Image (tube, rainbow, N blue to C red):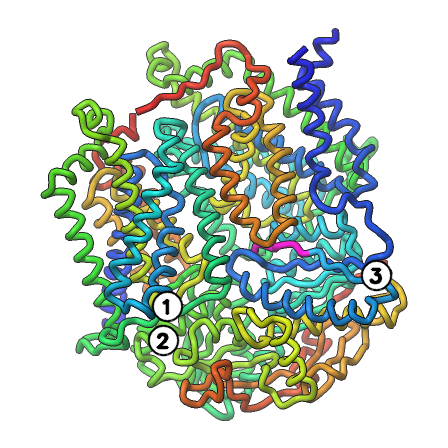
Amino acid sequence: MVRYFRHPMFITFAVFLILPAFIMKLGFMSLAIEVMIWVIFAMGFNILLGYTGLPSFGHGLFFGTGAYMCGLIQQHIIAGTWIPILGSMLFCGMIASIVGLFLAKKRGIYFALLTIALTQMFFFIAFQWDAVTGGENGLMGIERYALTFFGLFSIPIEGILSYYYFVFVILMVSLILLWKIVHSPLGTVLYATKQNEVRAKYLGYNAVLYKWIALVISGIFAGLAGALYAMLQHGAFANPMHWTKSGDVVMMVLIGGGLTNFFGPILGAVIFIALRDIISSITEHWYIFYGLLIVFVIIFLPEGILGYFRVGQTSGREEVLEEV
Amino acid sequence: MAEFYSQVFNGLVLGLLFGVMALGFMLILGVMEVINFSHGALFALGAYFALSLQPYLGYWASLIIAPLLVGVIGLFIEWSAVRRIYGKDPLLGLLMTFGMAMAFEEIIRIVWGKIGYSIAAPKFVAGPIDLGFIFYSKYRLFLAALAFMLLALVWIFLEKTPYGAIIKAGVSDSEMVLALGKNLRRIRTVVFGLGAALAGIAGVIAGPMWSLKPTMGWEVLMPSFVIVVIGGIGSFWGAVIGGLIVGLSKSLSILVWPRMSELAMYFIMAIVLVVRPRGIMGEKSLLEQ
Amino acid sequence: MKKALTQIAFAMVFLLTPFMSTNLGLAADDVVRMGVISPASGNYADMGAAERRGMTMAVEEFNARGGVLGKKIEMIVEDTETDPAAAARKAKKLIERDKVHFMLGAVSSSCAVAISEVAQRGNTVYFNTNTNSSECTGKHAHRCNFRVGPNNHMLVHGVAPWISRNIGKNWYFITHDYTWGRSGTKEFRQILKKEGGKDLGESLIPLGTRDFSSYLIKIRNLKAKPDIVMCTIGGVDNTAMMEQIFEFGMDKDFRFGFSLRDYSDAWTVGLGKNIGTFAIEWYHLLDTPGTKEFVAKYKKRWPNAKIPIPDNNTYQGYIGTRTMLRAVERAKSLKTNDIIRALEGHYIYDNMKNYPTYIRPWDHQFVQEVYIARAKKAKEAKDPTDFYEVIGSMKGEDIVRSRAENPCKLEPYK
C-alpha cells in the first residue's frame, strides 16, 4: 500500500491537488495552470520523442492550431467549453494524420528538418490569414464558458481556482491515459521502433504506421494543451507556432529526463517554466543565460535530471549512445 | 518587361547569397549530422565584425578578416561544445546550436547595443547602374560576382584538393572515412569552421544591402533549411541550384502573387518532397538510413 | 531508503521551484509598484530601451521628491520579447504575482493589444506607449487602457494633407502586408480621395522581407510617375528600405512619404541615408517650452546611451510615467477606478509642445499636437543628431477621429 503512495503518479496527483492552498494568496495560480498545461503537452510529445525516438521540432504548430481552433469554434460554431476543446483535439489529430503521411516515412535529422519547415509554414499562414486568426494581434476574446453536463447542471470555470481544478482533472486523465498507452503493446512497439526501426520491420511491424500513430497521438495532446492555454490566456497567438518556440517543449522533455523516464517531462516542465520566469525577471540580458543554460544542459545533462539521478527507470531501458 | 528582368536579376543575386549560406549549412549537416541553428547568428556576427573592422582596415581587409574571425569562432564552438553530441540524438545538436544562437544574439546586443547599424557599400560600387535594359544596383552585381567567386573557390577546394575529397567522402559516409584512417575529428572541426566562415562572409556582403540588427540572422536561416531539402544533402550543386531556386521563387512570385513570396519556397519544398524526396541532387547519405 | 529520499526530493522540487521567481507576493504596502512591460529582445529592443530610459527619468524625479502618496516608486520590468503571447503572459505575471499598481510600455501594437486585454481583465491601469495602431484606442479599446502617443489616424491626417498640398496629388503606395500596414494605407487613401488626388496603385510587401529592391524597381518602371510614394512600412524594415532606396538611386527622382518616422530608425541609417516626409510625435530640437531642459537632463542622466539625445520613444516613456504618477497624486489613491477618473478629461500643459495634450474620456487617446518633418540631408544638419527639419504641425483636435468615425465602447468601471 505504501508503495502506491511513493509512486510518482500519486505524488504528482497529491502535489497538484493541494498546491492551490499554498499559492493562491501569492498569485501563482496562473503559473501553476500553465505548468499543468505544458505537462500535458510535454507528456504527449514525449510519446513521439522519448518513446518513438522521432525528434520533432515543430510541435508548436499543433499547440498553436489547437489554441486557434478553440477560439474559432467558440466564436463561430458554439460557445462553450467541451465542444471547442474536443474540436481542437480532433482537428489537430486530423492535421497530424495528414502531415504524418509525409513525416512518418522519415527519421532522424531529416525528420527534424521537415518538422521545422512545416511549423514555419503554419506560423506564416496563421500570421497572414488575419481575417481568421487576427494576424499579428492574435485571436482575442476566448472565454471560459461554464461546463455544461447535458443541460442538467453547469460548473463555472471562469474563476482561477475552478479553472485550475478543471485543468487538473484533465491532466490526471491524460497522465493515466498516456501511462496506459506506454505500457500497452502499442507502446512496446513504439519503443522497439525507436531502438531499431529495421529490426522492428523485420519482426513484422509496420514501422511507418506506428510512427504515424505516435505523431497523431502527440498531435492530439498538443492540441488539447493549446486549447486549454487559449482559455487560460483568453487568446490565441501565432508565435508559439514559430519554430524557435517549438523548441520549448523539447527542452522540457530533455531537462526532465523524458528520454529515459516516463515522468521526466513533468519535472522538466516545472523547472523550465520556473527558470524562464526567474531568469527573465533578474536581468534584461536573460537571453544569453537562457541560451547558455540550454548548451550546458545538453553537454552535462543529456539524459535530463531524472536520467542523471537514475530515478525510477523501468527495467531494460538503456540509452543507446553510439559514437562515431 | 524591364520589371521581369530586374526581378530575375534580383532572384539570382539573392539566390547566390543564399547558396553560400546553404553550402556552409549543408557541409556541417552532411559531415556531422548536426543542424546548425547558429548559422544565422554566425551570419550576423560576420556583418558586425565587418562593421567594427571597416573603419580601421578598410573594406577589402575586413571582407577577409571578418569571416576568418567567424571561422575561428566556429572552430571554438565545435571544439568546446558541438563535438560532444556527435552520434547522439539529433535533437541534442539542434537544441545546442539553438542555445548558442540565442547566446550570440544577446552578445551582439551587449557588445554593439540594441540599435541597428548601417554599413556603407564601398565607394566604387555604391549607387545605381544603368544597364540599358534595366536600372540596377552596382552593389548587387558586385555581390553576385563575389558570391560566384566564393562558390567557385569552395568547389575547387572540394573537387580538386585531396582534403576536399575527404570532406566530400565524409558527407557521404563518415564511418567509412574513419575506417580509412583519416582523422575524422579534425575534419569535422575544419568543416564546422569552414561552414561558419561561409556564413560569416555571407553576412559581410549582405550587410550594406540589408543593414544590421541583432536579429538579422534568423531571416536567412530558414531559407538555408529549405534549400538543403530542395537541393539535397551532400551535393555542392544541390546547395547552389537550391539557392537559385529559392532566390528566384521569392523574386518571381512577387510578380504574380506578392503575398505568397515567402511561402513560395515552402511550396516548392513540398513538391520536391513528394516527387523526389532525396532532393534534386541529393545522394544517399547516412542521414537516410 | 535512497529511493524514498529521492522521491521526496522530487516532490519538494515541485513545491518550491515556482515560488523562486520574483516577489514572493509578500508585496510590501509601503511601496508603489509600477510595472514596465517593454521589449528588451526581439526587433524592437532598441526602442524599448529608449522608452525605459524616459520612464526611469520620471520615476527618479518623483522619488527625489519623496515618491508618490508618500511612498517610493519601484519599477518592475519585464521583457515583451516583441511577441504578443509572451507579452500577455508577462503582463499577467506583473498583475497577479508582482501585484503592480499600474503598468506602462509596449512599442509593438500587437503586444499592446494583448497586454490591454490582460490589463482589463485584471483591472489594472495600463498605458500603451510608443505604439501606433489605431485599433488600440478603437476596436481594442478598454476602460483600463490609455494610449500615450498619437495613433495612426492622427499621424496620417497630420502629414498626408500637407503632402497633397505641397508635394503632389499623384500617389503610389507601398504597404507592409499585415494589419497595421494595410490600415495605414487605407487611411492614406481616404485622405487622398478627400483631397481629390489620384491613386496610382499599390505594392503589397510581405512581412519579413528585408529586400525591397523588387518593389522599388517596379516603381521606377511605372508608366505614370507618382509625385510621391507613400509607405506604410513597419519599423524594422524601414531601415532596409532606406538603404535600398539609395542603392538603386531612387532618392534622386522620387519622393517618399511615411506616416511616422521613429528616430532610432533615422539614427540607424545615418544622416546620409535618411529620406522622406513624415509625421513625428516630438523632436529634441523643437523650440517648445521645457524641451531644452529635458534634453539637458537626459544627457546628464544617460551619458553613455547609444543615442545621445532623448528620442520620441524616450519622450513617451517620460510623459506617460509622469502623467500616471501625477494622476495617482490627484486621485490620492492607488485604486484603478480612481486613477482612471483622474486621467479622463485631464489636460497636460507641460508636454513640451505648443498645445496641451488632452486625455479623451471616451476612447482614452492622448490627443496631442503632431509635427510634420522631412529628413535633412547631411550638409543641412546643425549637429550629428539633427536629422529632421520640422516643416509644419497639426493640432490634436484637428486630426483625431470623431465619435462617429470611432465607434468604440469602453467597458463600465468595475
**In which quadrant will I find the N terminus of chain C?**
top right
Residue at 67% from the left image edge and 33% from the top image edge: A36
Q: Is residue A168 above or below residue B155?
A: above
Helix or strand or loop: what does disc 1 sit on? loop
Image spot of residue B11 (x, y percent): 27, 60
- Circles 1 and 2: CB atoms closer than 8 Å: yes
Residue C68 seen in render: yes
Q: Is residue C130 above or below residue A193?
A: below
- Please name whichever residue, C373 or B112, is drawn nearer the observer in this view of the structure: B112
Neighbours of disc 1 within 10 Å: few (<14), some (14-19), many (20+)? many
Image spot of residue B228 (x, y percent): 29, 43
Q: Amino acid at mark 2?
A: Ile
Tag 2 residue:
C245
Q: Amino acid at mark 3?
A: Thr
Residue C212, which numbered label?
1
Image: magenta residue range: C77-81
Q: Amino acid at mark 1?
A: Phe
Tag 3 residue:
C336
